[in-house]
Image: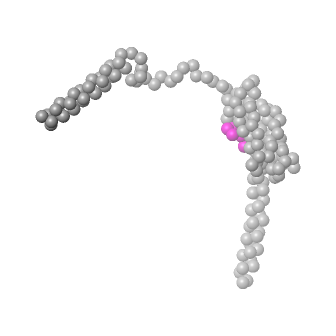
Amino acid sequence: MRTFVPAVVAGLACAVTAASPAAAAAVFVELNPSTVRVGDEFALRASCDDNLKSATVRGEPIGSVTVEPEFGFLTATVRVPADTKPGDYPVALICPEGAGATGVLHVVARVEPSRGPATGGGGTAPGPVGPVLIGGGLALALAGLALGAVSLRRRVG
């Protein structure tokens, strides 16, 4: 019985000191994806001490965005303006109670490929390869049918 009381006191002390970092980790901002092309959308997901009130996310390329409560988090969808230059931009969450968190948005240039990759000339390439393969396949099928007919004829006769 005497060891039970110190064990309970030690357990409560650990629980009280361990609760501080957990509460501090409850304030965050996530960008999904964190790397986006100019003109594309990304999702903001944030958390404050009280996720029932709206908060604000600010950053250079996106301006000021209000994140609204949804499914226990604060969320919003944001589009990177088309005139944004590629680079890394800090994004800051400002909670109503004064807490905050930061993240980084990586913006990359929009690049469109000029043509497909050079993967070689397979059987679907234009030219005489296609008709030769089709003709060879038909010849093998006809030879198989003829061989089957001859073998059936010998059994019957």
Q: Is residue 101 left or right of residue 132?
A: right
Q: Is residue 24 above or below residue 1?
A: above
Residues 44 and 14: in front is: 44
Q: Position of residue 136 (x, y in %)?
A: 29, 23
- Nearer-the-camera pick, 120 or 136: 136
The residue at the point 52 percent across, 22 percent down is 116
Magenta region includes residue 33? yes
Question: Which residue, as the protein is rendered here, is positioned at the far top?
Answer: 127
Give the residue drawn at x 80%, y 43%: 68
Tell me if residue 119 comes above or below residue 55 in the rendering: above
Say if residue 86 shows up in the picture. Answer: no
Can you say which quadrant of the picture contains the C terminus?
A: top left
- Report the predominant secondary structure element of the magenta stretch: strand
In the rendered view, tell whether residue 121 sits above or below residue 61. Answer: above
Magenta-drawn stretch contains 38: no
Q: Residue 67 placed where, x, y %? A: 80, 41
Badge count: 0
Q: Quadrant of residue 22?
A: bottom right
Q: Is residue 106 above or below residue 94?
A: above
* Location of residue 86 (image quadrant): top right
User: Relative to residue 142, is residue 76 drawn left or right?
Assistant: right
Locate residue 32: give its quadrant: top right
Q: Nearer the viewer, residue 140 or 82?
A: 140
Q: Magenta residues?
A: 30-34
Name the residue: 87% across, 47% down.
96
Image quadrant occupied by the N terminus: bottom right
Percent position of residue 75, x then y = 76, 43
Residue that extends furthest to the bottom in the rendered view of this protein = 1
Residue 120 appears at what percent x and percent y?
43, 23
Q: Residue at x 78, y 32 (%)?
A: 62
Q: Is residue 139 visible?
A: yes
